[in-house]
Image (tube, rainbow, N blue to C red):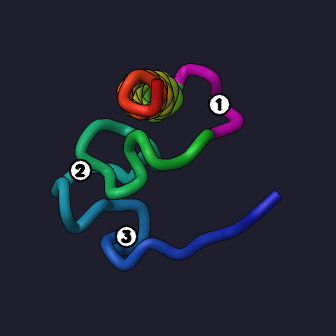
């Protein structure tokens, strides 16, 4: 469990998005960078896609280096 303070939050309003603060929503600085307990938070799906893309890129680099080493 962790806590954080967002520099864009002014009370219940996101100063960056000019709307109510909902951590993890699209446009939030945490979007796709953090996993939230609320499974409906859009950030969770974005984080999953980001990790899958990174994993695929790492696999491609591994295959490329393995082929050049043969």
**Image point 63% across, 23% down: which residue?**
39
Q: What residue sits right under mark 2 in the picture?
A: 19
**Residue sitting at the far right:** 1
Name the one closer to the observer, 40 or 45: 45
Q: Earlier in the sequence, mark 3 or mark 1?
A: 3
Query: Is residue 39 positioned above or below 32 on the image?
Result: above
Q: Is residue 51 left or right of residue 46?
A: right
Q: Tell which tag, 3 or 1, sits nearer the viewer.
A: 1
Measured as percent of width and height from the top left, residue 24 is found at 44, 43
Contact (CB < 8 A) between labels 3 and 1? Answer: no
Say which element carries label 3: strand
Q: Name the image quarter holding residue 31.
A: top left
Q: Which residues are magenta?
A: 36-40
Q: What residue sits right under mark 3 in the picture?
A: 9
Query: Is residue 25 positioned above or below 39 on the image?
Result: below
Q: Quadrant of the N terminus?
A: bottom right
Q: Is residue 28 left or right of residue 63?
A: left
**Label for residue 4?**
none
**Residue sitting at the far front:** 70
Q: What residue sits right under mark 1 in the picture?
A: 38
Q: Tell which tag, 1 or 2, sits nearer the viewer.
A: 1
Q: Name the image quarter holding residue 25.
A: top left
Is the residue marked by circle 3 packed among few (<14), some (14-19), or many (20+) residues within 10 Å?
Answer: some
């Amino acid at each position: 469990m962790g806590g954080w303070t967002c520099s864009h939050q002014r009370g219940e309003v996101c100063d960056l998005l000019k709307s109510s603060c909902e951590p993890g929503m699209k446009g939030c600085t945490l979007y796709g960078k953090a996993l939230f307990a609320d499974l409906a938070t859009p950030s969770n799906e974005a984080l999953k896609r980001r990790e899958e893309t990174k994993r695929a890129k790492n696999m491609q680099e591994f295959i490329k280096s393995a082929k050049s080493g043969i």
